[in-house]
Image (cartoon, coloured by chain):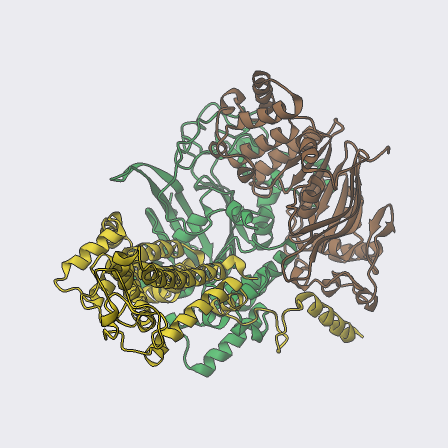
Amino acid sequence: MASARATKIDRLAGLAVRSPDDQDPDGAGPDSGLSLAASAWRRLRRNPVFIVGAVVIGLFLILAVLAPLIAPHDPGLRLLEDQVSRARNEIPPAQPGHPMGGDQFGRDFFSRMLLGSQQTLMVAVLATVIGLGGGLVLGTLAGAFGGWVDTLVMRIVDVMLSIPSLLLAVSIGALFSQQTQFTVILAVAIVQIPIFARLLRGTMLGVRESDHVLAARALGVKGRSIVFRHILPNSLGPVIVQSTLVLAIAILDAAALSFLGLGAADDATPEWGQMLGNAQDFFDSQPHLAIWPAACIVVVALGFTLVGESMREALDPRQRR
Amino acid sequence: MSEPAERGDALLTVDDLKMHFPIKRGVVLDRTVGYVYAVDGVSLEVRRGETYGLVGESGCGKTTLGRGILKLVEPTAGRVVFDGTDLSGLRGEPLRRMRRRMQMVFQDPLSSLDPRQSVESLLVEGMRAHDLDKGKESTAKRLRELLTAVGLPSTALRKYPHEFSGGQRQRIGIARALALEPDLIVADEPVSALDVSVQAQVINLLEDLQAEFGLTYLVIAHDLAVVRHISDRIGVMYLGALVEETDSDSLYAEPLHPYTKALLSAIPVPDPLVEDEREQILLTGDLPSPANPPSGCRFHTRCPWRQETRCDTERPQLREINAGHRVACHWAEDIAAGRIARHEVRPVYEPPDADVIPDVPLIGPASMTEVMDHH
Amino acid sequence: MGMALLEVRDLAVSFRRKGEEPTAAVDGISFDVHPGQTVGLVGESGCGKSVTSLAIMGLLPQRGNQVTGSVRFEGTELLGLSQKAMDERRGRDLGMVFQDPLSSLNPVIPVGLQVAEVLQRHRGRSRKEAMAESAELLDRVGIPDPTRRIDEYPHQLSGGMRQRALIAIALACRPRLLIADEPTTALDVTIQAQILKLLSEMVTGTDTALIMITHDLGVVAGLCDEVNVMYGGRIVERAKRHELFAEPRHPYTAGLLASIPRLDAPRGEKLVPIRGSVADNIPWTHACAFAPRCPNALDRCVEVTPELVDDRGGMLRCHNPVEPALRAGAEEVRA
């Protein structure tokens, strides 16, 4: 009799816990056995903001990968040079084989747009990775040791932060005698290092004071283990979110550097920012040369921003139930 | 005042422990403008196998004292001797090794468990730090034992802290401490973050574990009813110092210090008959700032038995009045004998504290109020 | 007793979240409060006691909440009253004291002015009159040296002083009903004793009624005339204070009393905990929500919802209540 009641209670309790949209095959609770990251991912998957952002980024990624295959022409070849007339501001119009016409040198504009996605995404990702890496090292040093290490690192970071980021990037770019795509990446990355470092250090200092870190100390866990198992993993959330936002910023910064003429001198490999910069002379007569790259930059940046924002939301521990 | 503790069975001896934290001010260069006297000369002794309860209101320094004893916060002065080893000089690896034997249970079971670790990894971590995980099978067996001991199902191992209720989380916290087979467990407000109906489960669990594993407890709490239930002996703290120490029964039956009397009379008892009958000793005013403690007896500003002489000027030391009953009050005997009458206390106006924010490594919520807030 | 000051009938509050079933925080509760009476709402976190008070005060956010039932104050229905009309009532007829006095006070306005503003708004006092009365009020709630404190900001006051200031604000217009939601939970016991004394002084001898919301049975024992014990959004037991503590009828009430360590109990007795936790609740539909944790549970308890019925002068929602005779027997065995 008693066990029958127990089963009944279990059944009723199950009713209370399970909501209709949770159809876990194993019938456990909605978040059962899920790590923090896994349950954040669950929430992320359902967020339309994330889906839109991810689709945008995904499309551009596919485009970038397939660009060499799809592009009808070599972006460096001046195939339509005969149709260019500098004097009359004439540029090859759309025509069979060249759906978007040519640029001011008679190169196939469509192919350049396609291959530009490769360069642009590469700049963004590399700059972010380098910036993140540098920021992690500095931030961890400051956050884990505290004391004079912290003071030293943070003063350097403060100095870097006090210079407007674009100005800093321009100065760094100008340090190199020869501008290449790599100098652009480096310039953009270095600008991001202090931002990452500061963010990580701040979060780490907060986490370092938290009860579970105190608990680990009380347990006699070794210092290194406390930093790398407890403090760092629990501090990465904001940094990860920031890095998606930095991806967007990096694209814009790189575009700005190219626009200012600090990009690769050789423009055989196209890059959207550079294309945008080159198009400025023709903006009155041929606005599409500027609008296309600008629109692509904005959309990709927006995609990264949407993903970043939705990740920030998903990683918020208050969202966990 | 350090009596030679030759009882022989003391597991922990705290001798004149002081924990002062500088208050720093200044934009460019930090200047020390004063100190917060969080713990200001505490001596006590915890005997092997007993439960010592440390009780006091927020701001009395009980949490800081607990952390100082475990050397999680470095004391300013004084000695902590654990099983014959002076912890004062202990640093680095020897201190870390020593931690195996003295463990801690925290107030807020959720914040003291790393949200990213599964229960298994939480439990194994301490064992690994002290080379107690000797092979997969013995560790697995040990984990099962631990879970059984604290009353959790073995399926708990692969779950994460957020999937448990408050009471279950506290069981995980207790299992984590037990995993190292400690001699001493310092439990800081072990039940105050839990629902009333669940508190009793955890209190009973702590008692059962003590009987089973021969543990020694130092229980720190603000709730005197809980402390009295669980403890053999109790120390009452006020503003960084012990004011009274005795066994649980005589503390309730014959409190000698005026503060203890007031504290006991303030605790509501869930019985209207008792509530209607009893005489409350209402204290006026608030706890003075530990950055600027009153001269003489720390309690004299609020004491309804304060006398013209001695109280304001001379700091009373703990002295043994009855066997095992220590009190820090100049007039304890006279109050007990009724030779001194209670009088009105006029609340004094304290000018607003100029935002005393001590530069204190008070990690986590240091008081009850903070924890209740996010409830 | 004459007409009730406050009549709550079938009050239910459910939270709606996008894409989820609405959850009932309060699941149909009814009670009366008479002038001058002190009524307790007791229960653990999640039992719906605070939501009840917010619903009565009309302080629940409009979005995402569905409030049904009826709350009549001196015969006037409060639910469905416009925001403006409700603002008018609050402060004048209904006062409220919250758990956290710091977040309930405006941090950038001196406390004296905060009290005065209420007087200006609801009683039409001039600024000068209001400030003078504000000082009087602060004095009445036991804030020493009120003429100086009046210019201080909330963060400059201690927790106990802040709670006093909040009580002064709530009482400024002599409301007919004061709701105190865990007013002492954030405070130390010695300060709690001061505040409880103040609250009871403020209501005894006047016809101001008090609803005391707390999880602490000890607080209830000293203060309330009538006690409602809540569980899972419903009232499970109602009784006069002495009856409730002498002869708890609901297994939940009895369980709570047995599980708290009492300061005056002989030592060495084991506590008798209630098994499980609130997470084990089951829905009230066709069952008793407490059944999974109940030592008295019968088969009936998971088949039929118990109703709140008259029981020895109080009300009780239980199929298998605790028999006083048995309890007395248990007491003897203990002794």
The quarter of the image holding the N terminus of chain C is top right
Q: Residue pushed farthest left?
A: A177
Q: Nearer the viewer, residue C280 or B92?
A: C280
- Rendered residue at 78%/62% (across/down): C285
Taking the image as shown, residue A223 lies to the left or right of residue B274, namely left
Image hue for chain C: brown
Residue B149 found in image quarter: bottom right
Where's residue B373, x and y in %? Answer: 54, 47
Image hue for chain B: green
Taking the image as shown, residue B102 lies to the left or right of residue C28, namely left
The quarter of the image holding the C terminus of chain C is bottom right
Image hue for chain A: yellow
Q: Nearer the viewer, residue C183 or B203?
A: C183
Whether A209 is drawn above or below A58: the answer is above
Whether A140 is drawn above or below C204: the answer is below
Where's residue B327, x and y in %? Answer: 49, 40
Where's residue C255, x and y in %? Answer: 72, 56
Residue B8 seen in the figure:
no
Whether B293 is drawn above or below C246: the answer is above
Where's residue B63, x and y in %? Answer: 45, 49
Q: Nearer the viewer, residue A219 or B353?
A: B353
Residue B368 seen in the figure:
yes
